[in-house]
Amino acid sequence: MKKINDRLISWASILDDTAEEQARTASTMPFIYPHLALMPDAHPGLGATVGSVIPTLRAVIPAAVGVDIGCGMIAVKTQLTRESLDQKLAATGSTLKDLREQIERAVPLSAGAYNRKIVATAEPRIRELEELAEKAGFDPASYVGNWRLQLGTLGSGNHFIEASLDEDDTVWLFLHSGSRGVGNKIAQKHIRVAQKLMEKWWITLPDNDLAYLVEGTPEFERYVLELGWAQKFALLNREEMMDRVIRQVAELTGEPIDERERINTHHNFTQKETHFGKSVWLSRKGAISAREGELGLIPGSMGTASYVVVGRGNKVALESSPHGAGRTHSRSAARKAFTHDELREAMVGIEYRDTDAFLDEIPAAYKPIDRVMADAAELVSIRHTLRQIVNVKGD
């Protein structure tokens, strides 16, 4: 832990100047209380640093939540081991490549890829979202007409689906996604609304993306209602995809999956919490909740380890922890710095789709995940270390 100033505390041993300066700027906002916490995976983002925990009094900065509202992780521990998985796949004449390809057929991948129809498992989840939208007083179709067809889709970038093994060779199913296009449209609208209000009120900001909404105003109340809906969409989106992945594994192995554990966590979200004696809106942008005893998920980059963790309830860190490895190279910089052969080398032993479309996701474009986890030792304890055997991503 490093106290940068009275309003900014960092757990990042690797922190570039741009990210630190961005965090310093955000920490000067007058409604921050008691301080902004930087997680070990912190790196530059829009307005607020990715990997930051931002407590605010009677205000919320929409860009500090992020444009992928509710993005997060879900993991399921199965009864399978590596040995039993290999045996059952062999008995049906299948391989890990077949598993990857079957998952790719079951879950639409990449930006702009949607379901062709609403499947049975999605129907109750869509009804729940329809009811929630009605209570919130808005129509999600005003943002994206086909939002129902987005439920159960992965997206692109650093979103993924994986089969992994823990230290006992037990198989875990693991995926990363958020609120898709509909959540992005909701976020972008409210960022613009906040920026227009700053102009209307003649408020000068150090960064236009730090525009905020004030509690008690119609604009704030509208944002919070739609934010809550998008966070629920993201959680149910992950549930829907995980159910499909489980079905594919069951079909290929010829054995129903016995879920031993299911964990579903956001890492781009805002909620009311109490810290240092005051009720605040706590925005975690690239950070997970890590209350004492709370289970969480911290993925590495493709080709590296991921972790199931238990929160330590660190009060100074606002009961939070990192959400992943954290980039050291932008996507364009990674494409210039690394080669397809280097990506292949990093993915040896993992079944994945071999394409240079994933070059900007090469592990070397991220902070070393073991360094991030060492920095996070005060924030979480490691319950399981997972290593990938199958990786599924969208272009």
Image (spheres, grey):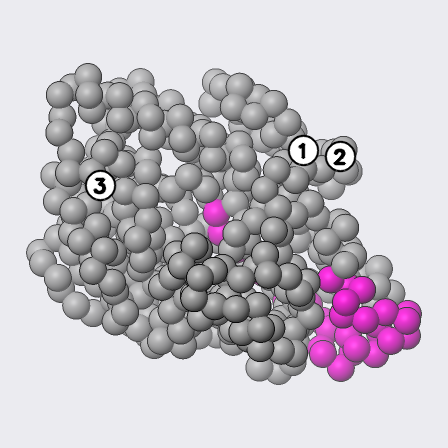
Q: Find the distance from the CA under tag 3 to the CA under tag 1.
A: 35 Å
Rendering coords of residue 123 (x, y %): 71, 34
Give the spatial CA distance, label 1 vs label 2.
Answer: 7 Å
x 87%, y 65%: residue: 254
Instruction: Identify whether 231 is placed above or below 291.
Output: above
Q: Residues within 10 Å of mark 1 (few under 14, many from 20)?
A: some
* Relative height, residue 146 to residue 332 (above, below): above
| Badge 1 or badge 2: first in the primary sequence | 2
Can residue 322 be seen here? yes
Percent x, y of residue 128 = 61, 31
Circle on res. 56: 3
From the image, which quarter does the N terminus lie in? bottom left
Q: Nearer the viewer, mark 2 or mark 3?
A: 2
According to the picture, the residue beneath numbered tag 1 turns out to be 149
Point out the residue furthest to the left here. Answer: 6
Query: Which of the labelled discs sits on residue 116, or is there none?
Result: 2
> Which span is picked out in magenta?
71-100
The secondary element bearing badge 1 is classed as: helix
| Label ID, residue 89 | none
Q: Position of residue 212 (x, y in %)?
A: 24, 31
Q: Which kind of residue does numbered mark 3 sit on?
A: Thr
Please report whichever mark, 3 or 1, sits nearer to the chain's N-terminal start: 3
**Label 2 SS:** loop
Q: Is residue 196 above or below residue 341?
A: above
Which quarter of the figure has residue 116?
Answer: top right
